[in-house]
Every structure is written in C-alpha cells, then in structure tokens.
Amino acid sequence: MARQRSEAPAPLLAEGDKALAPADVIAEMRRAILEGEHWFTALLEAVRRWRVPEEVIDGHRYRYLIGGEAFDWLRLAERLVDAAADLIPPEEAEALLFEGRWPIELAEEEFAARIGPAKHSAHLNFLYGVLVEQALQLSVEEELHKEASACVWGLTPRVDRGVYERIYGKPPEELFAAYYEETGIILEREVSYDDLLEFTYWLFKYRLKRQEKARVASDTRKGLAQLSRMEMAVAARRRGARLDEAEFSERYVLDGAAG
C-alpha cells in the first residue's frame, strides 16, 4: 500500500514533566515495579510521561496517536508490557491486551488522573471516534446482511460498499479519494491496522461535519448499542471512561470539537 505523510505527527502530551526519551520512561517504569509498585500503576505512570506518538521497533510499527488527536492507550500499553514482560504476570498482561481487563480496580476518575487530562481527553477521542465508529459500521453491516437474506430474489449486493454508502453517503472509492485529498495518503486494497484506524477516525470526523445533528445522534446511539451488545459478556472489561450519548453530544455535537 502506498502512503505518505506531509508532516511529522504531533507529540503526545505529558503534563508537568520534562520530555523523556522512551528508553528513560521504560527504565523508570521497570525501576518502580522492581521497587514494589504494582506493574499496572507503574505502566499508567509511564503512559502519562510518554511523548512519542509512534515508533518502529524491530520492524513492528506502534502508532499511539491517531489523526493527531485520538490516543490508543492500549497500543502503548502493548509496547510497555513488551518492555517489561519479565516483570509482569503473563496472564494479567494477556487479559489487559486482549480483553481490556485491568488487573486491579481503579475508578474512571483515578484512571483519568493517572494518565493525565490531555491524554485522557485524547483517549475519549479514540473511544468515540474509532471504537464506536467501528461498532456503527458493524451494526449497519448486520442490517445489510439481514436485508440481503430477506430479499426474494436472493440478491447479495456488496455489503462493504453498502456500509459506506448508508453511513457516509458515498461509495468507498469516493471516500478514499476525499481522504487522499485531505491527508495525502493513498489507501489501496491491503490496508495496515494503523492506517485503518486513521481512516476510521477520519470517517468519524467526516460524518460529524456532514450529517445533521439528529442523524449524528441516531447513528452514534446505534454504535453505542452495538458496542454494548458486543461487551455484555465481558463484565470485567474496563475502558477508563463511561460512554454515553450525553457525553458524546457535549464533546462533539454541541461544542463542535471534532470539526
């Protein structure tokens, strides 16, 4: 896949700290764990102090900041867990990275304070702009599958194309072209995980700018409901934030924060 960036991504914010190199942040985290601090709180402190928005480690790309404003904190957690794998119980690490399950109880407010207000706000951008958007797409995909199965003539239109047209009002090739015009990034058939997250967040903002408020609310409600259904069986999952329509409206619809 061909892609290009016109400028370097903005650094992640680390409130109240001097800028530390990733190696220094990791060294501090390891030291804290060795001195008896729980690995998860030490990891959250490392998240708070982290400033690098993306890295390539041993040929593997880690992108933590999506669209310059949506923070994928679990992606950073994956990087930090790898750097301290010898100090972290493997079952707890797997539960965090694959199930989003925290090893200790923390209130949402404490989680927000531990990673810092700027990163927590960017974390909310990721939850609403990527996770909820993905859930909305899945919900519409399921609707289209049901419609196709109920069709008398057994027609099976391309569901992926229908998802884009129903949510965003345009076929995928037009959206890809608009994305290229705005970002300079060409998306082809094979899209990397990080680039897919970038495109999903761009679609979220595209939807907010072009839809009427009632439609934005309706689609977001659909995405939130789908996300809730997906996670009903995982009662111990933690997002670090309470997702609801009122919070969404305050952040994006009323204040226009995504424009």
Image (cartoon, rainbow, N blue to C red):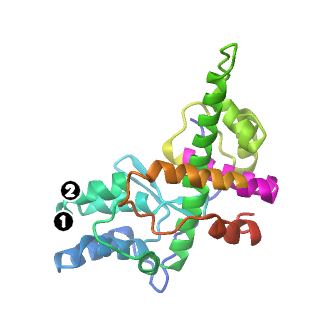
Q: Say if the magenta span includes residue 158.
A: no
Q: Amino acid at mark 1?
A: Leu
Percent across and percent down for residue 16 are 47, 86
Percent across and percent down for residue 150 are 65, 23
Q: How far apart are the two marked residues, 1 and 2, measured between alpha carbons?
A: 9 Å
Is 62 left or right of 96, judged from the image as shown?
right
Which residue is pictured at 62% across the width and 53% down the height?
201
Is 7 left or right of 88, judged from the image as shown?
right
Q: Amino acid at mark 2?
A: Pro
Q: In the figure, residue 143 lies in which quadrant?
A: top right
Query: In this orientation, does residue 249 appear?
Result: yes
State whether residue 188 is above or below residue 8: above
Query: In this orientation, does residue 187 appear?
Result: no
Q: Residues within 10 Å of mark 2 (few under 14, many from 20)?
A: few
Q: Nearer the viewer, mark 1 or mark 2?
A: 2
Which residue is pictured at 68% across the width and 16% down the height?
155
Question: If the image is split into quadrants, where does the C terminus sit?
Answer: bottom right
| Magenta stretch, residue numbers | 196-217
Q: Say if the magenta span includes residue 207.
A: yes
Q: Which residue is mark 2?
A: 90
Element assignment for label 1: helix
Percent across and percent down for residue 55 are 44, 57
Percent across and percent down for residue 152 are 69, 15
- Which is the main secondary structure of the residues drawn in magenta? helix
State whether residue 139 is above or below residue 9: above
State whether residue 9 is above or below residue 148: below
Q: Residues within 10 Å of mark 1 (few under 14, many from 20)?
A: few
Is 226 left or right of 35, judged from the image as shown?
right
Element assignment for label 2: helix
Q: Which residue is mark 1?
A: 87
